[in-house]
Every structure is written in structure tokens, then in C-alpha cells.
């Protein structure tokens, strides 16, 4: 049986990665697997081609864009691309994996538009911008300027929430994890 597609998008600091990692670790029965994205950045640490990412040169990436091979892609900086290949997703789905996409809001909308009812799109929303600011400051990983940039981007990203199948407000992490699990389990079982 073919797998299904589950899209997660959220502003930075909303808790999306925490929820996705919990689902992957605590619920093997869901048969979740990450979508393996392409990137033009160099591998970091022990990252391997085809495992964490498919590593491509900028020219290889641009050739795949021209050939319409991506579901979604973004040029984050000049010649620094990230994207999801249609063929990679199809391979994973054919293996029966339920593929999780951890993508930005535009990418999430693109994947949902391409697959329609075959995909479930979830938007993880912080309870408020003030709480998001508190979380980002609490991480102590960003400069004040970087936090302001993330807040501005988050305000923009929140306008995309209505385009998703399901919005989970992460005001209580345990409740948000349980809600994500139920929505995904119901989607996989139907």
C-alpha cells in the first residue's frame, strides 16, 4: 500500500520540529519518514548524500528547476537552494512510507496544491507573537536583530494559516502533540 503525505509548516519557534521529532520517535506505528530534500550547501558533520539531503551543485539544482523536477524549492541565498524532488517523494511513498515534509509555508502550500487530497497539511501556530518572541529569546541562539527578522517573517507566515487543512495552536506542547497525533492517525487510516 502506498504511503501518504503529511506537511508541517510553522513560523520559527512555534514548536513544529519538536512535534515532528516526537511523532517520529514515539509513534513508529505511523510509519513516518522524512522527505529527503535537495540542497546546494555542503554536507555538515556526518551528513551523507541521500540520507539527510541530496547534495547537488548549484548548476545541477538549476537544471532540475528547468526540467520541472521539484515540488517546491527556494533560493535562500544566492546559489544556496533547498527543494523537494517529485521523484524522491514518489519513491518513498511507493515503499509505503508516510512522508513528512517540514517546510516553510510557501513550500507547504505548493506540496498541498500538487497532491491535493493525498496530502494532509498542518500549520503549527504559536499562541501569540509575544509568546513566540519569548521562545526565540529563550533559545539564546539568535541576535536581537535575528529575532526581529524572525518575528517579522512569522507575522507574514501566520497569514498563510487558513490555507492549511488543520491549524494546531501550540499553547500547550503536550496537547499540541496529542492533537497532531490524532489528526495524522485519522488521515493515515482513511
Image (cartoon, helix red, strand yellow):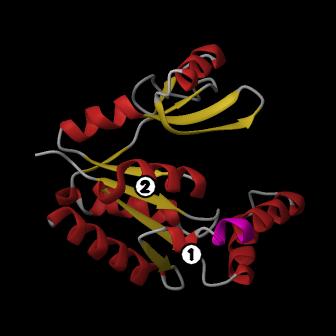
Residue 13 coordinates in the image, percent (x, y): 63, 66
Q: Secondary structure at mark 1?
A: strand
Residue 2 coordinates in the image, percent (x, y): 16, 45
123 over 44 or under it: above or below: below
Dot label at residue 125 = 1
120 over 86 or under it: above or below: below
- Direction from residue 89 to residue 64 in the image, left or right: right
Q: Residue at x 36, y 72 (%)?
A: 180
Residue of label 2: 112
Q: What range is drawn magenta here?
A: 155-159
Q: Is residue 129 magenta?
A: no
Quadrant of residue 6 within the rendered picture = bottom left
Residue 104 coordinates in the image, percent (x, y): 58, 54
Residue lying at the far right in this picture: please name it.
Answer: 145
Q: Earlier in the sequence, mark 2 or mark 1?
A: 2
Q: Residues within 10 Å of mark 2 (few under 14, many from 20)?
A: many
Q: Please tell me which residue lies in front, 179 or 93.
A: 93
Q: Residue at x 35, y 79 (%)?
A: 179
Q: Residue at x 36, y 50 (%)?
A: 115
Dot label at residue 145 = none
Amino acid at each position: 500500500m502506498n504511503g501518504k503525505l503529511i506537511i508541517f509548516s510553522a513560523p520559527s519557534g512555534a514548536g513544529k520540529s519538536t512535534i515532528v521529532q516526537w511523532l517520529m520517535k514515539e509513534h513508529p506505528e505511523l510509519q513516518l519518514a522524512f522527505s529527503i530534500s535537495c540542497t546546494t550547501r555542503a554536507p555538515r558533520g556526518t551528513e551523507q548524500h541521500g540520507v539527510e539531503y541530496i547534495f547537488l551543485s548549484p548548476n545541477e539544482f538549476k537544471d532540475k528547476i528547468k526540467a520541472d523536477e521539484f515540488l517546491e524549492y527556494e533560493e535562500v541565498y544566492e546559489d544556496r537552494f533547498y527543494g523537494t524532488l517529485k521523484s524522491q517523494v514518489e519513491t518513498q511513498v511507493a515503499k509505503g512510507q508516510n512522508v513528512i515534509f517540514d517546510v516553510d509555508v510557501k513550500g507547504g502550500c505548493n506540496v498541498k496544491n500538487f497532491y491535493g487530497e493525498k496530502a494532509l497539511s498542518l500549520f503549527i501556530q504559536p499562541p501569540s507573537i509575544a509568546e513566540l518572541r519569548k521562545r526565540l529569546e529563550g533559545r539564546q541562539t539568535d541576535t536581537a536583530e535575528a529575532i526581529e527578522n524572525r518575528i517579522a517573517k512569522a507575522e507574514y507566515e501566520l497569514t498563510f494559516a487558513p490555507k492549511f487543512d488543520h491549524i494546531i495552536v501550540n499553547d500547550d506542547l503536550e496537547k499540541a502533540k496529542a492533537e497532531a497525533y490524532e489528526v495524522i492517525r485519522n488521515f493515515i487510516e482513511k
